């Protein structure tokens, strides 16, 4: 039913096709951009072709050109798709898990405990997400695992709040009362009766956040706080472009390929999630259908 | 209304303590030796003292609650330590850079708010018509464009190719004028100061430098505001009181402005708090891309050079600022929606 509506809407259709494209690129990365023999054991390291730092325009061997430090742009983009999915899925998955556990427990127990947990969530939410992530990655050091950690720490709160609201409603329902009267243990009530009836909005929210998580992760890489240098990561590819953005005096667009290709990859990836998410929201929002 | 304000003000210290605790926990992830740097007031102190002496001197070997109290005492004195990357005390660095960021934020907020609401209204009025699709497509592309990508492309086109909007805060010649003794720095904001000093040429130069960063900041948030304005307008449009207003013969303009738009603004006011959060985050990137010397660039360079003193200081500053901004937003909210005061 939902799927049918998604397929009928032209915008979400474009989103689904784009996403499918990225999934295929991620799966078939080793065939699309084969890893050179000399770094077979570390395919996420982008190969460099030559010395010096100048970018080189697209050629037959390197269809998207070489960026600063002679890193192959095409290779970085193809393998960067895997990085983007990894970061997006791991962060969303972990943040959801933590948020759902804390939010539902807090709402189910209720009372003073709930009050304290929610004030705690308030403090976390009162920080700008990006700045919080910058602080954590700066303190923990560079690396994708640290980026993931920082994003999870400041992302679970949204899901916790969302599920708390639904659990507060559902826990007064008769079937929960019945389960309680029947002597079912609390953990079992939560996992068997409460969560299955409250988790759906969280999952939708999570899918809509995928785009923004990948943007934040690549922003950190752009600022030099994310993946180590030479790791296949779109944000880093764009940070390489920064010094070349103004080109040469006689041709300001000389190095266009250093920013356009990786930029296009991020934009299309995020766009695909947002198109799907937007259509989802319209389908799920009964107010607009009336 | 007064009790509402009083309650909000009473809640203020609780949030502030929460913010300091959070920063403190982040600090505790560092080793005492790394932390020493956040306590040293000037490079002079490093002479004739070993790191162990300094760790003991600043009580970094003490248990957490003692360290927290000491740290808070320093904060109350306004002492945030010495920043290596800015080579001046953190307090001074923030004071110098802050006007630039405020200037950028002020110039960005007006187009963001009015543009976003305007687009959302158009979209809702033409629901499911070509104009609606057009403005939504415009918005969703903006929502998907990471600000650093968009900023770099603007820089490439409008500075590299056309030479219209240069990076930085002022051109070289204007900067020289501003730094001379004759030019009085009243506020630190170039646009305001230049007008007060009677220099329209410098004012124009400052504005020229602001346009590209403002567009970068605005595009993303237009999309966000459009979305919220559109859906809340659509909801309000179907309400009974709107039908009543039309039925009693009010003109479409009065219905739209008085009955629909006012009520539709309530959700918009609700998100304005999180919008300010996002704008402050966006400032870090925009300032980095356009080499605009404000707090955001300060934080970003500090983070790149692992200048913990500076990062913790600016974070704390951001936290305090946000608490105050949220307070203002809540008060405005109470003005827009009288029901909030009764809660």
Image (cartoon, grey):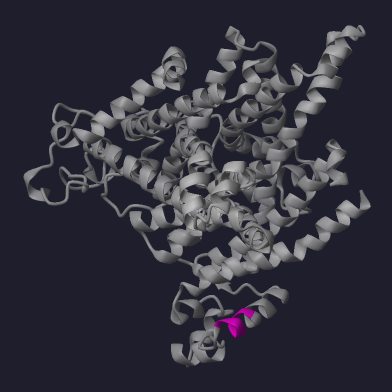
Q: Is residue B50 left or right of residue A56?
A: right
Residue sitting nearer the eye, B80 or A34: A34
Residue B85 visible, this angle:
yes
Residue sitting nearer the eye, A101 or A52: A101
Q: Is residue A57 above or below residue A202?
A: above
The part of the image, by quadrant, that contains residue B270 is: top right
Residue A47 image position (x, y, % from top left): 17, 44
Q: Residue furthest front?
A: A182
User: Residue at 41% across / 65% down in the picture?
Assistant: A140
Residue sitting nearer the eye, B142 or A246: B142
Residue B50 visible, this angle:
no
Please report the bounds of the magenta region as a residue range: B64-68
Q: Is residue B187 left or right of residue B248?
A: left
Q: Is residue B91 above or below residue B191?
A: below
Q: Is residue B65 magenta?
A: yes
Residue B259 image position (x, y, % from top left): 84, 21
Q: Residue furthest left?
A: A37
Q: Magenta: predominant secondary structure element?
A: helix
Residue A131 image position (x, y, % from top left): 54, 54
Instruction: Please count the marks in the image.
Output: 0
Q: Is residue B38 magenta?
A: no
Q: Is residue B124 left or right of residue A283?
A: right
Residue B50 image position (x, y, % from top left): 44, 91
The part of the image, by quadrant, that contains residue B121 is: top right
User: Residue at 67% across / 78% down in the picture?
Assistant: B74
Q: Is residue A209 left or right of residue A55?
A: right
């Amino acid at each position: 039913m939902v799927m049918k509506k998604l397929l009928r809407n032209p915008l979400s259709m474009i989103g689904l096709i784009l996403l499918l494209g990225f999934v295929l690129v991620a799966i078939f990365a080793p065939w699309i951009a084969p890893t050179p023999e000399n770094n077979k054991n570390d395919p996420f390291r982008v190969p460099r072709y030559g010395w010096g730092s100048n970018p080189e325009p697209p050629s037959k061997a390197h269809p998207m050109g070489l960026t600063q430090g002679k890193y192959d742009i095409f290779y970085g983009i193809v393998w960067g798709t895997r990085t983007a999915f990894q970061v997006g899925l791991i962060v969303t998955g972990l943040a959801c898990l933590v948020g759902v556990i804390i939010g539902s427990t807090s709402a189910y127990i209720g009372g003073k405990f709930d009050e304290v947990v929610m004030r705690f969530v308030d403090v976390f939410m009162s920080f700008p997400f990006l700045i919080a992530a910058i602080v954590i990655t700066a303190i923990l050091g560079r690396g994708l695992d640290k980026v993931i950690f920082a994003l999870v720490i400041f992302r679970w709160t949204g899901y916790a709040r969302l599920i708390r609201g639904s659990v507060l409603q559902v826990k007064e329902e008769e079937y929960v009362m019945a389960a309680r009267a029947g002597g079912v243990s609390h953990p079992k009530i939560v996992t068997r009766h409460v969560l299955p009836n409250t988790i759906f909005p969280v999952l939708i929210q999570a899918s809509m956040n995928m785009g923004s998580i990948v943007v934040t992760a690549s922003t950190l890489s752009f600022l030099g706080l994310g993946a180590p240098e030479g790791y296949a990561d779109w944000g880093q590819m764009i940070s390489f472009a920064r010094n070349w953005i103004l080109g040469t005096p006689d041709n300001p667009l000389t190095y266009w390929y250093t920013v356009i290709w990786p930029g296009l990859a991020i934009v299309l990836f995020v766009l695909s999630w947002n198109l799907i998410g937007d259509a989802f929201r319209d389908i799920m929002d009964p107010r607009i259908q009336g | 209304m007064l009790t509402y304000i009083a309650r909000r003000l009473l809640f203020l210290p609780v949030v502030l303590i929460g913010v300091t605790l959070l920063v403190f926990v982040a600090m505790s992830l560092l080793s005492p030796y790394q932390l020493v740097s956040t306590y040293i007031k000037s490079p002079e102190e490093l002479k004739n003292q070993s790191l162990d002496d300094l760790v003991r001197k600043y009580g970094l070997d003490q248990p957490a609650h003692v360290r927290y109290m000491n740290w808070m005492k320093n904060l109350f004195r306004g002492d945030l330590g010495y920043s290596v990357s800015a080579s001046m005390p953190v307090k001074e660095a923030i004071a110098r850079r802050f006007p630039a960021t405020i200037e950028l934020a002020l110039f960005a907020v007006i187009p963001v708010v009015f543009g976003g609401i305007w687009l959302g209204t158009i979209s809702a009025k033409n629901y499911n018509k070509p104009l609606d699709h057009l403005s939504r497509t415009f918005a969703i592309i903006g929502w998907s464009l990471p600000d650093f990508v968009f900023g770099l492309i603007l820089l490439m086109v409008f500075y590299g190719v056309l030479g219209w909007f240069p990076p930085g805060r002022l051109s070289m010649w204007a900067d020289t004028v501003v730094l001379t003794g004759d030019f009085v720095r009243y506020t630190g904001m170039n646009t305001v100061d230049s007008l007060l000093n009677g220099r329209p040429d410098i004012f124009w130069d400052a504005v020229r430098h602001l346009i590209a960063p403002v567009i970068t900041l605005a595009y993303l948030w237009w999309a966000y505001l459009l979305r919220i304005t559109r859906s809340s307008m659509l909801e309000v449009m179907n309400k009974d009181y709107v039908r009543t207003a039309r039925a009693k013969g009010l003109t479409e303009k009065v219905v739209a402005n008085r009955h629909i738009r006012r009520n539709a603004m309530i959700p918009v006011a609700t998100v304005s708090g999180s919008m300010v959060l996002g704008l402050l985050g966006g400032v870090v990137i925009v300032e980095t891309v356009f080499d605009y010397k404000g707090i955001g660039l300060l934080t970003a360079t500090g983070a790149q050079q692992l200048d913990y003193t500076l990062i913790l200081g600016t974070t704390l500053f951001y936290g305090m600022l946000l608490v105050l901004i949220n307070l203002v937003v809540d008060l405005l909210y109470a003005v827009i929606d009288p029901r909030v005061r009764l809660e």
